[in-house]
Amino acid sequence: MDKAVLNEIVEKTHELIKSPTCSSETKEAAQRWLDAVGTDAEKEETQKYVDELEADIMPIDNLINFAQSEQGAQYFGADAAANIAAHAKEIKAAGARYCDCPACSIVATILEKKSELLK
């Protein structure tokens, strides 16, 4: 992998780990990947990391559906869920494919480099 791309992904991965909206599973996969960079385990951990990122990024329609559900209202609180749903509809109308929370935004940036990561 190109050194500049690697450095960018390492930096974004550190940001992801610090993100308040990042799941514990993604944080663990991110840390395992960071620990594997430059080792014999790097290729295997890179694939696992990409798989985890793809599993955890929230498609915008899923966010809208969850925020509008009873479960979403219980999770976020009714007012916050309504605001999240409205915001998600706005960004979807503007072309967003994914949630724009800090973690999903970072994951989207990392996944833009997926082909370079998996070389």
Image (cartoon, rainbow, N blue to C red):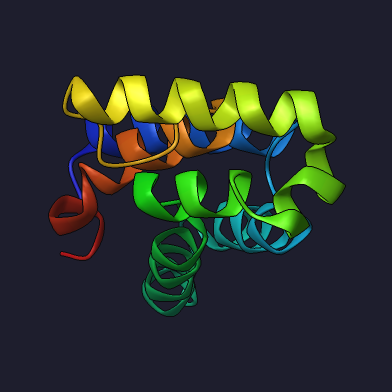
Which sits in the foreground, 16 or 21?
Answer: 21
- Considering the image in quadrants, where does the C terminus appear? bottom left
In which quadrant of the rendered view does residue 14 lie?
top right
Q: Could you say where residue 5 lies in the image, as x and y percent from the top left?
A: 25, 35
- The answer to whether residue 15 is seen in the rendering is no
Residue at (45% x, 56% y) in the render: 62
Q: Residue at horizontal 76%, vertical 58%?
A: 71
Coordinates of residue 114 in the picture (x, y in percent)? 22, 54
- Is 115 in front, or is 83? 83
Q: Is residue 13 above or below residue 87?
A: below
In the image, what residue occupies the spot 49% across and 53% down?
A: 65
Total marks placed: 0
Left-right relation of 114 to 110: left
Determine whether 72 is above or below 32 in the image: above
**Lateral position of residue 73 relative to residue 11, left or right:** right
User: Going 39% across and 37% down the picture, which residue do you hit?
Assistant: 9
Q: Is 76 in front, or is 47?
A: 76
Q: Is residue 55 above or below residue 105?
A: below
Residue 22 seen: yes
Q: Quadrant of residue 95?
A: top left
- Relative image position of residue 98 (x, y in whole percent): 35, 41
Q: Position of residue 66 (x, y in %)?
A: 58, 53
